[in-house]
Amino acid sequence: MNNALQSLLDLLALEQIEQDIFRGQSQASVVPRVFGGQVAAQALVAAGRTVPADRPPHSLHAYFLRPGDPGAPIVYTVDRIRDGRSFTTRRVVAVQHGQPIFHLSASFQADEEGLEHQEPMPPAPDPLELPTAAEMLPRYADLFAEGVADRMLEARAAIDLRYVGEPPFGSVGEPREPRSQVWFRTHGKLDDASGIPRPLLDICLVTYVSDMTLLDSVLLAHGRGGWAVGDVVGASLDHAMWFHRPLRADEWLLYDQESPTAQGGRGLGKGRIFTADGQLAVSVIQEGVIRVPRG
């Protein structure tokens, strides 16, 4: 486990300041606001801390309300909406400077048998044949403003994330099919020292990563490179995830993403996360603001 991964785990280990009230810190981001995946993962940790460990999350639905201040702590208040025989529901509000910045509803379920089917895993190359971020990003250094590549590497130091094909900033001016893929896993094996029980820890880490690249396919459809090259500005608006099957965040996961539509200054991204042996583990949908700067 590298230092960056340990720092991420420390970030998820929220401080409890009162019953059902937790406080979290923030890490440096590539943009001057709290990374959306961080606040979503922390909110899910807060919800999970009020639920028995044998009931992992099976879905979450969230809205990003205001940009978060990375220099200030975030307070998470959990409402215990329902504790049923099979399902548990929690609502979490994240607050900074007296204002809500994020709202999450999450549902947890006890394990049970049921009908089974899934879509097949799409073809993808072996992740070990793909370049790491440290190998890939220097190729595009001349496209970025000074310091951007370094900030991207720092922000992703805890996660080994590898693009299948060219990333959006490598295809500027060349519209492509609105589909993208990345493989990812944590930089190092996870243990039980974080204080967050598994599988909640794995699910929260996947929630963290799910916000990194989901809108890439929107950019690819229009030959845009994104914030990294300054040809669009954007932010996440809402985010939904369904957790279907067990996964481990420290083993390779394929994030297959596409964009069915963009309009009105917004773009929609859909994603499926598969385990390396082809199990469909997670479905994701996100809408984000994507605007072309004027002038």
Image (spheres, helix red, strand yellow):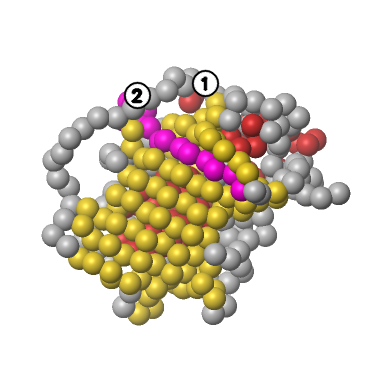
Q: Where does the image place residue 194, in percent across and percent down from the top left? A: 36, 57
Q: Does 110 sit left or right of 219 as displayed?
A: left
The residue identified by callout 1 is 129
Q: Where does the image place residue 180, in percent across and percent down from the top left? A: 55, 30
Q: Residue at x 44, y 58 (%)?
A: 62
Between residue 180 and residue 143, name the one nearer to us.
180
Residue 270 magenta-drawn? yes
The residue identified by callout 2 is 120
Per the image, label 1 sits on a secondary structure element best described as helix
Disc 2 residue type (three-letter): Pro
Res. 289 visible in picture: yes
Q: Residue at x 58, y 30 (%)?
A: 178
Highlighted range, magenta:
266-279
Q: Residue at x 13, y 60 (%)?
A: 85
Name the quarter where the N terminus is drawn. Answer: top left
Q: In the image, is residue 17 above or below residue 147?
A: below
Camera-near label (2 vs 1) is 2
